[in-house]
Image: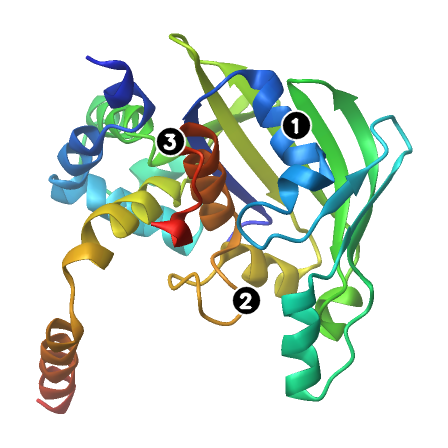
Amino acid sequence: MSDTQVFRIWIKAPAEKIWQAITDPEWTAKYAYAAPQFYELKKGGRFYSTATEEMKAYATAGGFELPEIIIDGEVLEAEPPRRLVQTWRMLMDPTTGAEPFTTLTYEIEEAGAGVQRVTITHDTPGAPATAAMIKGNPEAAAEGGGGWAWVLSDLKSLLETGKIMTDA
Amino acid sequence: MTDDDRVFDDALVFRALADPSRRFLLDLLFVRDGRTQSELEGELEMTRFGVAKHLRVLEEAGLVVVRRSGREKLHYLNPVPIRQIHDRWIDKFTEQHVTALIDLKRTLEEES
């Protein structure tokens, strides 16, 4: 496995709508892991994501502590609605939390006929546990969930049909 | 081609997966991606043009993403279309007994 993982999907929605679904906490709470993500959209701006009630209940049941902030990082580039580059560290797990910050890039490109090509590139040098986590599990309901492939599939469902996959 | 086809074309993915050389290329990228065409060529008994053509079919189906790094073009596996095929075709039709049969086959083959 290389230190870079790439995930690409085509979504029939305006770029602005996709940008909003990625960067607005109200939108990020609607699909995939449903943890709200907060962005200060400028170079050097803060990024963090907070635990959902469901995640907290899961942690309590498992007898471990979950930090209030489950992912943190810093915005490196923000060019709405086309390009977002940030650092990213997963704090839900002590192993990934101890790894160095990784770099996450979102690119939203025009692909004709109202379709956008959305590409996530995640660079994880020196962070093997994080790399394994984002790769995801084939079963979205399993431990750790479906990773970026699942997040993008769910984002596409939400924007194109108004429903997330688990609603079906 | 309708708009829907362009957004996610099952047919392109199935067609891309129908060829053994292309499946082999995906397996190679699964083991380690971020490789150049020339690195991949070394693993196949095929002309450079043949490999280039297969990689292009995989890229058009969305199964491979090409990224530039300096002067090189690196090939990455994109698991998203496989995920979509899984959600659209596999989840819907597989039931418990199918999984049980696959498990049985695996167990028997491992024993032999």
At which x and y percent is residue B27? 30, 51
The residue lying at 14 percent from left, 80 percent from top is B100
**Above or below, comparing residue B73 to residue B110 in the picture:** above
Residue A98 can be seen in this image: yes
Left or right: residue B43 versus residue A160 is left
The quadrant of the rendering that contains the N terminus of chain B is top left
Q: Which label belongs to residue A86?
A: none
Residue toward you, B73 or A115: A115
**Above or below, comparing residue A5 to residue A35 in the picture:** above
Q: Which residue is mark 2?
A: A144
Picture mark count = 3
Residue toward you, B57 or A52: A52
Q: Which label belongs to residue B37?
A: 3
Mark 1, secondary structure of its residue:
helix
Q: Give the Cα separation between the discs numbered 2 and 1.
A: 25 Å
At which x and y percent is residue B101? 9, 78
Residue A39 in which image quadrant: top right
At which x and y percent is residue A104? 68, 40
Q: Which residue is mark 1?
A: A20
**Above or below, comparing residue B30 to residue A152 in the picture:** below
Do tags 1 and 3 sit on the same chain?
Answer: no
Residue toward you, A44 or B97: B97
Contact check, label 1 and label 3, Cβ < 8 Å: no
The amino acid on which the numbered mark 1 sits, given as a three-letter code, is Gln
Residue B55 in which image quadrant: top left
Chain under label 3? B
Contact check, label 2 and label 3, Cβ < 8 Å: no
The amino acid on which the numbered mark 3 sits, given as a three-letter code, is Gln
Q: Give the Cα separation between the discs numbered 1 and 3.
A: 36 Å
Residue A37 in which image quadrant: top right
Label 1 crowding class (10 Å Cα cut-off): few <14, some 14-19, many 20+?
some
Left or right: residue A63 versus residue A12 is right
